[in-house]
Amino acid sequence: MIKTDALIIGAGPTGLFTAHQLKLIGLECEVVDNLDKIGGQCIELYPDKPIYDIPAIPECTGEELTNNLIKQLKPFDIKFHLSERVDEVKKEKDNWIVRTNNRKLFSTPNVIIAGGVGSFEPRKFSPKECEKFENKSLFYSVKDKKLFKGKIVTIFGGGDSALDWAVELSKISKVNLIHRRDEFRGSQATLDKVKELTKIGNIRLLTKYQLVNIIGKSDIESIVIKSDDGDTQNLKTDYVLGFFGLIMQLGPIANWGLNLNKKTIEVDTEKFQTNQKGIYAIGDICSYPGKLKLILSGFHEGALAARACFKLAKPNEKYRFEFTTTSSNLLKRLGKKE
């Protein structure tokens, strides 16, 4: 059982800044995220796209913003629990007991839901036969490219992830790239590289085809694909990678007894607390009159939720607002000299 003053669900920009605010006022916190990396939507959906509405930063990418927020947290020892989905939250006296899908347990008086618009999950292949091969020879992300060295890899998708990995894996593997349309959504530069590699035989490109079946026992031996005009092909392959983007789900949050409004959680605007004492919702997942879905708004919501956490985490201490420019306590926590 991990005990902490506050548990943040979501490691996107709002969750990261809230962790900073909690540590700044002397509270311990841990961060859980369903993704295998820090950054949330900024990293998964638009790492290279410019963001223009962060105060004092004229322009930055999602990746740059994430890296700067991580840098801001460096003075603090914050533990991140990645690839962990919170499945259950239940009350036990004055604390919430939080259990993840990997049976990790947390005990905390404060739970801050900063999960964007829910948890991200990959869009999956439709044939049911695919399920038994998942995480063995069928994957929706690449954690270690060395696994595919010298193998036949079949990649499905038409976005940046599919194109990037087709180019990268063609250096060490035989690559089939399959897309259901002729048009691709990835960057033109990468698409040009794919076409160049196709001409010299490093990549086999098939468009207007979709997966209809997977053949194999414990591992994939071949796949069956079918074109729009009915042509069917059987391709020998060792691995299958699917890059169809992410879908966003409320997931288990829907069963926590919170007031929901069209897949968002209703909160007050004083503490950003839900209808359950000690559970807060900030960022895109919360709703209230006048709500703006901006990263800036999430930062404001997280700062107020962090201060509310102090009252439950340290009920015998009085919270006093302090400016980082003048407070010796806050400067000390930041590792700064007065």
Image: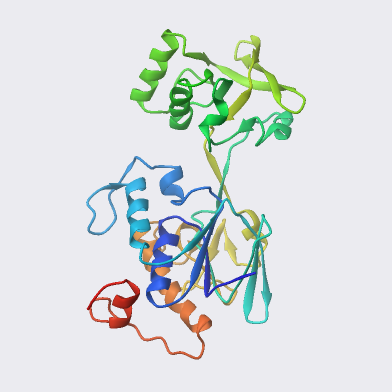
Type of colouring:
rainbow
Instruction: Give the image location of residue 54, x and y in percent.
Output: 29, 56
Direction right: furthest residue: 217
Instruction: Give the image location of residue 155, x and y in percent.
Output: 55, 24
| Residue 229 in which image quadrant | top right
Quadrant where the N terminus is found in the figure:
bottom right
Between residues 270 and 20, which one lies in front from this camera angle? Answer: 20
| Residue 233 in which image quadrant | top right
User: Which residue shows up at 36% across the image and 62% down it?
Assistant: 74
Quadrant where the C terminus is found in the figure:
bottom left
Between residues 206 and 83, which one lies in front from this camera angle? Answer: 83
Instruction: Give the image location of residue 22, x and y in percent.
Output: 43, 72
Between residues 29 and 60, which one lies in front from this camera angle? Answer: 29
Instruction: Give the image location of residue 276, x and y in percent.
Output: 60, 74
| Residue 91 in which image quadrant | bottom right
Residue 301 visible to an observer of this rendering: no
125 is higher (above) or lower (below) than 237: below
Between residues 280 and 92, which one lies in front from this camera angle? Answer: 92
Residue 197 visible to an observer of this rendering: yes
User: Which residue shows up at 73% across the image and 31% down it?
Assistant: 128
- Total tally of numbered discs in the picture: 0
Left or right placement of residue 334 versus residue 34 in this view: left
54 is higher (above) or lower (below) than 197: below
46 is higher (above) or lower (below) than 282: above
